Image (tube, grey):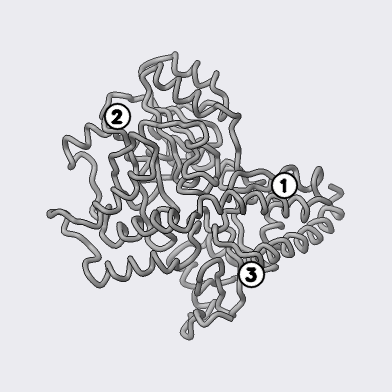
Amino acid sequence: MSTLTTHHTADVASVMDVYRRHLSRGRARLAAMTGQVMEVASEGTKVWDADGKEYLDCGGYGVFLLGHRHPKVMEAVIEQIHRHPMATRILLEPAAARAAAALARITPPGLDMVHFVTSGAEATETAIKLARAHGKQRLISTTGGYHGKTTGALALTAKPFYQAPFRPLLPAEHVPYGDACALEKALEQGEAACVVVEPVQGEGGVILPPAGYLADVQRLCAAHGALFVLDEIQTGLGRLGTWWGATPEDVRPDVLLVGKNLSGGIIPVAAAVATKEAYAPFDRDPFLHTSTFAAAPVAMAAAAAAVTAIDEERLVERAADLGQTILHLLHQALAPLLGGAVVEIRGRGLLIGIELADEALAGELVLHLIEAGVLVNHSLNAHTVVRLTPPALLTASDLDRLAEAFTTAATALANATARKGI
């Protein structure tokens, strides 16, 4: 067991009681389903529970490309905390300048203006407000897309289950993902729009678009005067084995949404990075869109250090290589189930999805993997898809452990499907 496991962990039963009374009875029920496991420590690719059991973290909803407690990010954050963790928001603040310059250096050319926020959903809201400041009232996103759950972002997140309790929302239109013709038809109707798409749909179930789709979206937005927003909150900063999902097709959106990996796995931070033209309304008046905790120096230290570490440690290239290795081992481990319980295994870089025949089987796979000491995620917009977003730091022994866990889980799943007659 790692020396990181705490010597003062709270009792699981008391934590469950507090969840029920003060946090969420629904979360408490979910915890009961997963064995009431309580995470208390982490480092690198591993997480430890209150009993000292070690887990290989291949989940984290895309946050931990750099793993847990990356030393370079930790060092930068701790130094900033000791010196100046929060800013007055009245004077110039150098940590924000360093983080903005670091991010602008690795975004597609022309995306130079950075607006920092604290979450991906806030980055989406920033893009919506920029579009409105340019007079583009229509919102167009894609079915299966996920852009956050704040009210503006929720209008773009095309999932009735999440939207229904909060309607009416901002009006938004949804077109099929990967279908440039459908987008063209939508753009031909009505006034200029704001179009928001993902290069790969993560929460939609790791859906990869056809080749040339993003280039078509860029071309159509330019032709119809639409603001093109590319949501790379989950896919950006190396997750797909390229710096950006936009990279392979040399696409430059008007606004790029960044998050998750920008945190370095340490401090929540996200951003909307825009061209000078798209950013002009906020450039003229910095008080049009503000947030007290946005661009806090401690978060800016994490962001700058995360970008530097990804670059210096060549984690983009490593994500591409590891992704191919993991896809291969998953096909081997799950081969007996392909065409039955397992519908498809797909992915790009370290964003990998396993589509199961039904939601119950997906849930069983997650539980079997937890028992085997591997953490993965379900997909919020596609409950039949189990998703892997592992760190780009996985070692050969980590990969062996992953293969063993999936082989064990496949055997258990095969027994379950035999009982169901699948």
Task: Please identify the residue farthest to the left as the structure is shown.
Answer: 91
Look at the image and tell me in which quarter the N terminus lies.
Answer: bottom right
Residue for badge 2: 132
Q: Residues within 10 Å of mark 2 (few under 14, many from 20)?
A: some
Residue at image location 28% in from the left, 40% down from the top: 113
Q: Amino acid at mark 3?
A: Gly
* Disc ID at residue 356: 1
Residue for badge 3: 35
Q: Secondary structure at mark 2?
A: helix
Measured as percent of width and height from the top left, residue 399 is found at 67, 62
Q: Amino acid at mark 1?
A: Leu
Residue 68 shown left or right of residue 275 in the figure: right
Residue at image location 57% in from the left, 41% down from the top: 204
Mark before the other along the chain sequence, 3 or 1: 3
Q: Residues within 10 Å of mark 1 (few under 14, many from 20)?
A: many
Residue at image location 86% in from the left, 54% down from the top: 418
Residue 155 shown left or right of residue 375 in the figure: left
Q: Are marks 1 and 2 in contact (CB under 8 Å)?
A: no
Measured as percent of width and height from the top left, residue 371 is found at 69, 68
Q: Are marks 3 and 1 in contact (CB under 8 Å)?
A: no
Residue at image location 54% in from the left, 77% down from the top: 12
The mark closer to the camera, 3 or 2, is: 2
